[in-house]
Amino acid sequence: MTQAEIAVDRVTHRYGDRTVLEEVTVRLTEHRVGVIGANGSGKSTFARLLNGLVLPSAGTVTVDGLDTRRDGKAVRRKVGFIFTDPDAQIVMPTVAEDIAFGMRRLKLPEEQVRQRVAELIARFGLSGLEDHPAHLLSGGQKQLLALAAVLAPEPDILVCDEPTTLLDLRNTRRFSALLETLEQRVVLVTHHLELLENFDRVLVFDEGRLIEDTKPAVAVATYRKLMT
Amino acid sequence: MIGLYHPADSPLHRAPVGLKLAVLLGAMVVLFGVGGPVVVTVALVVTVVAYAVAKIPWRLGLAQLRPVLWVIGVAAGFHLFTSGPQHAAVVAGQLLVAVALAALLTLTTRVSAMLRVFETAARPFRPLGVDPARVALLLALTIRCVPLLINILGTVREARQARGVGRNPLALVTPAVVRALRTADELGEALAARGVDD
């Protein structure tokens, strides 16, 4: 049986001449993993490697035994991705349509799609907004919609790249509380350090290198020290 | 199409989209093909009744016409001088009814239902290499991108004013194009993350 883990093995990634990740090796099996680091430290590239949005220049990334280079489709089916700006990831014009988008692409029966859309709309506090234009939602509602849409096809893992950066405190807490209730494994890249308090493990990146891999309190202390 | 749908329980909301599109097309043919004061007057009355049947609030109905009133005014003004007042009134009436009926279609039809009709309509072209799902996605993205682009233009215009750049069109177009391209990249990345290219 394939072990449930994300394995990043000696991964280096370059954009042109610029190396953004260097010789990163890590195995993630925990339910909640946080990723922190300064701007440009490579954490967003690291997140993108996990669902095959970015393929490594060297090394391999496997998710539950699936290679992101070889099995990209299966990896993306398994790993949902939340971006910082919800406006850039909502692809359909209305709330219900965007939640249904991923499931329709998987050709799920229409009745099942409808049921799941209704369930997610209720769960994420979007009731009454089914036919509402996505662009008219508030920032918090947009990020909730993005989360609902990514969860609709039931991925096993959720990778979030600074999902609360554009949210106010109330919506950040709301988003965080929803994340806590998810059954999925979560990899959260964030600058909101308080969100990581109950996480199992936190990685700290600095200038493309993984410099700390430990419990949240220690990792956050390392990061704070790095920022002084 | 950009989120005009007004939920209500009415025969027009329940009617199949294909039928509504066919009726709209037929109405346009009669309105512009036959024309004349009688046809336009009848069409105006039918349109008002249709809005009432669809339970569209009158303010919402009028709001659909407001953005195009200046176009109708210009067209009517032109015909007033070239063809006389009666023809100008007919042209204004034709345009008014056409816009109102098209708006009524979007007010009573969910975007999802409209997309499915376009997807179905594209199916016969599958042997020619047309992917119906892609056609529907293309349409959906087009609808989605309109408010995104309006938002980008608004932000750039504000930034330009804040910096006191004045009315230089380059100062509007250049950053707007750059931001639009960046948004397109991000949207592409989001589509890839959601498995569109798989």
Image: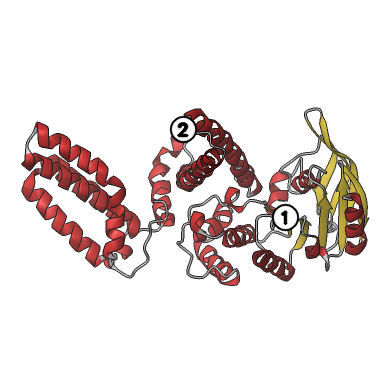
Disc 1 versus disc 2: distance between alpha carbons?
A: 40 Å
Residue A196, x across and y down, in percent: 81, 63
B4 relative to A191 in the view: left or right: left
- The residue closer to the viewer here, B119 or A216, is A216
Residue A64, quarter of the rendered image: bottom right
Dot 2 amino acid type: Arg
Which class describes the residues within 10 Å of circle 1: few (<14), some (14-19), or many (20+)? Answer: many
Residue B139, x across and y down, in percent: 45, 44
Which residue matches tag 2?
B167
Quadrant occupied by the C terminus of chain B: top right
A109 relative to B77 in the view: left or right: right
- The residue closer to the viewer here, A165 or B97, is A165
Which residue matches tag 1?
A160
Q: Chain of mark 2?
A: B
- The residue closer to the viewer here, A12 or A39, is A39
Answer above or below: position of B62 versus A58.
below
Residue A147, x across and y down, in percent: 64, 60
**Is disc 1 placed on a helix, strand or loop?**
strand
Asked if residue A108 can be seen in this view, the reply is no
B42 relative to A228 in the view: left or right: left
Residue A171, x across and y down, in percent: 65, 65
Closer to the camera: disc 1 or disc 2? Answer: 2
Dot 1 amino acid type: Cys
Proximity of marks 1 and 2: CB atoms separated by less than 8 Å: no
Q: Residue at x 48, y 65 (%)?
A: A129
The circle drawn on residue B49 is: none
**Is disc 2 placed on a helix, strand or loop?**
loop
Q: Chain of mark 1?
A: A
Chosen colour scheme: secondary structure
